Every structure is written in structure tokens, then in C-alpha cells.
Image (cartoon, helix red, strand yellow):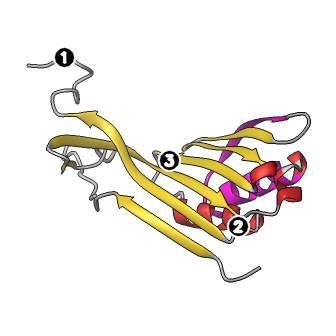
Amino acid sequence: MGASVHRSIKVKYKAKALYNSNSIVPFLIEAKLLGGLILKSLGTQILLDLENCNSDILDDMEFIKATLKKAATVAGATVIGETFHKFQPVGVTGVVSIAESHICIHTWPEYSYASVDIFSCGDEFNLDMASRIIEEGLQSSDSFSKVLERGLRQGQTDGGKDK
């Protein structure tokens, strides 16, 4: 296969942690302007489309499971659970639950394609590293990703009790 191609759309804004002077616990993430709305970020999500993957790997549930768990642990997450299913005649779906949130996958070996969702609300988990490990493990030669900040809209930072 040729060189790998990765295209990315960044829908992410650099955030800085705020600290409460009455506590050593950091606030969530600084509220930021996102498309006209103020967003208090609670986490970051990467939606990853992997094309031109090795179709044999995409149909190997044990390999997929090991790859997602490796991506989680090497990138700094704490694995707390997993569930996977092998479809007939082909394909795999699965979730690795991490203390920071989750890594999900659904494969289409017949199209040499996998869809991956990586979400984290933790600061120590390296989402980019996890993405690269999965992309390389599935031998994707062409990938596309969207990075999203997830969180609360203005006025929703108090549990929905607007003032």
C-alpha cells in the first residue's frame, strides 16, 4: 500500500483550566465561544473514518479488541470494561469503556472501512495518540477525522437551573 493520508477537520478550541480559589479541584474547562454559543467544555470527541483498511483485520474481533484496548492504555486511559460483537457474515462492533469515557468501533470489511468514536473528559488521555494507534493497527491508508468539544451551552452550566 502507498503512503497513508489523514485529513482532519478541527472543530476544537484551545481550552485552559480554571481553578476555584476555594478548592484544589479544577473547574471544568473555561467557557468558550463556539459557533455563536458559549460552551463549557466537558470533554473532547474524535470521530474517525478509516478507509482502505486491511479487510481481514476488520473482521478479526480479537484483534480489534486488542487494538482498542492498546490504544486506550498506551494513550493514558484507564480501561474499566468492554463489549464486542462479531457479525455474520462479516464485521465487528465494540466499545472499550474507559474511566475517561469510551472508544467505539464499527467495521465494514466488505468496504475496507471502519468508523471510530473516541471521547474523553480527562486531561491525561491523549486522543491523538489513541487515534494513531487504531489507524496504524487497522492498516488504514486514508483517514478523516472531526474533533469536537462537547459540553454545556450558556445558561446550562448550573444543571439547567437558569437564573
Q: Which residue is mark 3?
A: 120
Q: Position of residue 51 (x, y in %)?
A: 66, 61
Q: Which residues are magenta?
A: 63-86
Q: Position of residue 6 (x, y in %)?
A: 55, 71
Which mark identifies residue 161? 1
Q: Nearer the viewer, residue 35 or 89?
A: 89
111 lies above or below 3: above
Say whether residue 81 is magenta: yes
In the displayed image of the protein, which residue is found farthest to the bottom? Answer: 3
Instruction: Give, as a three-letter code, the residue at label 3.
Output: Ser
For residue 41, which quarter of the picture?
Answer: top left
Q: Label 1 near label 3: C-beta < 8 Å?
A: no
Is residue 76 visible to the viewer in this orientation of the structure? yes
Instruction: Give, as a three-letter code, the residue at label 1.
Output: Lys
* Mark 1 → mark 2, Cα distance in angstroms: 46 Å
57 lies above or below 88: below
Residue at (13, 19) in percent of width and height = 162
Question: Which class describes the residues within 10 Å of circle 2: few (<14), some (14-19), or many (20+)?
Answer: many
**Which badge, 3 or 1, is on the more N-terminal residue?**
3
Q: Position of residue 127 (x, y in %)?
A: 53, 59
Q: In terms of secondary structure, where does tag 3 sit?
A: strand
Instruction: Give, as a three-letter code, the residue at label 2.
Output: Ser
